[in-house]
Amino acid sequence: GEKIGQGKINASQWLKDNPNIAKKIEKQITDSIKETQ
């Protein structure tokens, strides 16, 4: 498998290259935050 986000620079570059996945991750994070509140 590929290593995702080796360091912050690569992570942000990866998110730029994969905006649809980034959106999905962002939604999962906001959903889990809402659940804990």
Image (cartoon, rainbow, N blue to C red):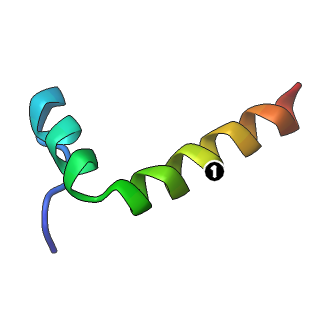
Task: Give the quarter of the figure containing the C terminus.
Answer: top right
Query: Residue 9 at what x, y percent from top left?
Result: 11, 30
Q: Going 75% across and 44% down the picture, which residue do you hit?
A: 31
Q: Going 16% across and 74% down the picture, which residue do you hit?
A: 1
SS for tag 1? helix
Query: Residue 27 at what x, y percent from top left?
Result: 63, 48
- Badge 1 amino acid: Gln
Task: Locate residue 26 relative to residue 2 in the image: left or right.
Answer: right
Q: In the current view of this chain or complex, which residue is farthest to the bottom?
A: 1
Query: Residue 5 at what x, y percent from top left?
Result: 19, 44
Task: Locate residue 33 relative to residue 24 in the image: left or right.
Answer: right
**37 relative to 5, above or below:** above
Q: Going 41% across and 51% down the picture, which residue do you hit?
A: 22
Q: Nearer the viewer, residue 13 or 28?
A: 13
Image quarter of residue 34: top right
Residues packed near mark 1 inside 10 Å, few (<14), some (14 to 19) or many (20 plus): few
Task: Locate residue 15 relative to residue 5 in the image: left or right.
Answer: right
Number of marks in picture = 1
Residue at mark 1:
28
